[in-house]
Every structure is written in structure tokens, then in C-alpha cells.
Image: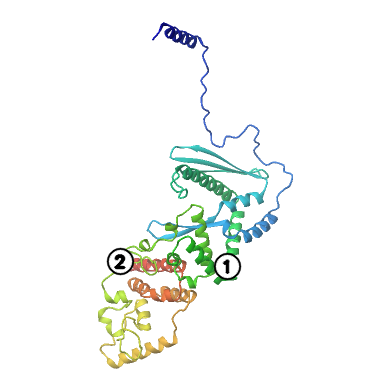
Amino acid sequence: MSNTDANDRRTALDQFAAAPAREVMTAPSVQPMMSPGDRVFGAQQVAVYRDEARILQKLAALGAAAGDDWFYRFPVKSKNGQKSFIEGPSIKLANDVARIYGNCEVDTRVIDLGASWLIYARFTDFESGYALTRPFQQDKGASRLGGDDVARKLDIAFQIGVSKAIRNVVTNALQTFADYAFDAARNSLVEKIGKDVQKWRAEMLVRLKDRGVDPQRVEFVLGRAAVDWTAPDIAKVIAMMKAVADGMATIDETFPPKDKQVGDDIDRETGEVTEPATTDASAASGQTGSASDAGSATSPADPATNQPSSTPPKDATASAASGQAAPDTAADPSKAGAEKGAAAAGTEKTAAPKNEAEYEAFANAWIDALADADEGDKRWKSEKNLRNKANVGGDVREKLQEKLATKTAEIRDADRS
């Protein structure tokens, strides 16, 4: 190093040491929902006061036009592993409700927590002075959209979090108006579909095909074949597809593939949660009597009933379901013939339920009359094909299963006491 270079470096160091001290600027701390100095709290005078009746009229009209844009539906699993669905208002509904309600403000503040964002959303009603703040924590890895682009997925996750925070605070602050708008949108969609169900059914199958979704997966979730989809069924599918498009659920979560549709405790044809399968032939075929009650079942060649041996006579099934022992007809052949003849007559007079409403009434009747818990469980399993033929939907099946579970639990508690 030359003397000239050394002198230059000394001069630079001397100048740096003689320079005046600079004030260190610290980064401002983030305080959620910190109000500006000019923000006024409490009720304020406004130019145009709101008219609640007029607001409801506007919401009804817009709800009829918005349809599925105003609500969503996606699947969740309960603690016992059963699948249920959550329905609710969308961010578009929240924005429209706040806009139509008027004289209000929705504000958000975001705090970066590292792995997640904490989003504070506040709703303020200038006319009444009411204000509500709700926090919402959004995981940065929550987005299912964006592909392999990490930056895009992060941005989508942030936008979803802000939308959810705004939706939550608006639908809670204006709950009555939000519920009214939600019902208006859902009912209008069902009514619109009901005017031409076949057209909507065909269009839905095309949309599913475009998304690469096998209709069987949707049939599994709804509990009925595509040809039997009703207007409410199609409305549910539309809402579920919207939840997928919005990134709230994936296709596989909403409509499970065939290899994930069943488990050890789920019926392979209906998706109903059942008890572990047994090796007892009579239980598998739906017979409710024991081996000693074989006389109450008909043989394959019995001309009196013309029913296969796997199907018990109607009177025997009803007797077992109500907890009463089947009549001992094996000891008296003539009595057995009379019982079979009566069973055949009863079968001819009482037709099997042909639709969902008839089966629901039919099942409610025998569940109410149930006196033996085990026989009730067996009967429910034996009527699986009957529910399929009657096109009983998943909602009704779940309701009846819950009722049966409550009834059998009461019977078992009474037996133990």
C-alpha cells in the first residue's frame, strides 16, 4: 500500500469521527385499530337517515338476483368423524349489506405475527354510534390456490384473511340484516332452479365434467343419484362449488374420491356411519329374529309371501322392532301357515315408502314405538336398500340416525337402572 493511499484512508476516518452524531430512527410500533385524532365516537348527525324497511326491500331484491354469490357451503368433520356442512354468508353479501345499510364504516388493521397475520376488523355505525371490533387470525399457509408460486399463495392467503375478517365483523354487527339477506339469496336460488330442474341438473353435470369431478362423488355426498337431484340438492352443489372456487375448501374435501369415500365404520353404498360389520348372516341380511325364531322367517319357495328368505315378513319385523318376541310358530304348523298368510296380506295392504317424505314418516313411526335398542339398530341396517330406493337424502338420514341413537340410548339407560 502506498503512502498516498494510507493518507487518504486516515483523512476519511478523521472526517467520519468528526461528523456530528445522527439521531437513530426507531420503527414505529403497530397498535391495532389505533384511531386518528379526528375520529369522533358516539352517534353523529347524518345527511340522510336510514330506513330499515327500505333496507329489507333492497336486500330481498338483490338477494333474488345474487343467488349463490351471497352464500357458501363447505364440508367439515365433527369430533366423532362424521361429515357435516357449514353454510354462511359470503364476503359479497357482507359488502352489499354494509353498503345498503349505509352511514357506517368498516376498517381493518393487520399485525404480522410471523407464521400468521392477526387482522382486526372494526365496524362503526355513525348514525347510532355503535362500534364492534373482531380479531381474526389467518395462517399464512392456509391458501389452497396459487399452485407452486409461493408469493402468489401468500398474497391469496392474505386476501382471504382480510375478506373473512370483514365478513365476520359485518355479519355480527348487522346480524338481523345479514340473516335476512342470506335467506333471501338461498331461497331465491332454490326457487330459480325449481322452475326448470332438468335444465339445471344437466348444466350442473356439465360443470362438474369441466372441473374433472366424477358425478358419482357428488352423488355420494348428496345421498342420491344425479337423475333424482332436486332443486335444493342442486343449490347445495352450486354453493359447495363456490366454496371451492373461493379457496375455502378443496374438491377432494368437498367431494371425496372413491378411494376415500368409505371407512371401516361407513356403509359403502350410502355413506352412513354404522357399527362394525358382524359375521352373523341374519344381521347382514336384515333379519331381526334369533336362530330360535327361524319359524317367523319365510323360506325361498314359500308361495304365501313370495319373498326371499333374507327378507323377514312385515309383521315379524315390526314385532322385533317394537321389542316383542316373534310368535313361536315352529311348534304348530297350522299356526305357522296362518301367520304366513297374515304376513302376505299385510304386505299387500301396506306399500313400502316410495319417496323421502314417506320413508321419514315410516321411520319416525317405528322409532317412536321402539322398545329394544339392539333390534332398532338391526332394523336400521336392514332398511338400507329401502332408503336407497326411496331416494332418502343425507340430511334426512342423519336426522333419523340421531333420533334413533337418542331413542336407543334412552332404552339402554332404562335397562341399566
Precedes in sequence: disc 1 or disc 2 = 1
* 337 or 307, nearer to the observer: 307
Which residue is denoted by mark 1 in the rendering?
193
**Where residue 184 appears, x then y in whole percent?**
61, 61
Q: Viewer-proximal residue, 206 or 197?
A: 206
- Residue in the image at 42% along x and 8% along y: 6
Q: Nearer the viewer, residue 226 or 115?
A: 226
Tag count = 2
Q: Quadrant of residue 377?
A: bottom left
In the rendered image, the quadrant that contains the N terminus is top left
Question: Residue 92 at x, y = what percent?
Answer: 59, 52
Residue 61: x and y, percent?
Answer: 66, 60
Q: Residue at x 44, y 10 (%)?
A: 9
Tag 2: amino acid: Pro
Query: Residue at the location (43% across, 81% down)?
Result: 352
Mark 1 closeness class: few <14, some 14–19, many ≥20 residues within 10 Å? many
* Residue at the disc numbered 2: 276
Q: Quarter of the image containing the C terminus?
A: bottom left
At mark 1, the secondary structure is helix
Q: Secondary structure at mark 2?
A: loop
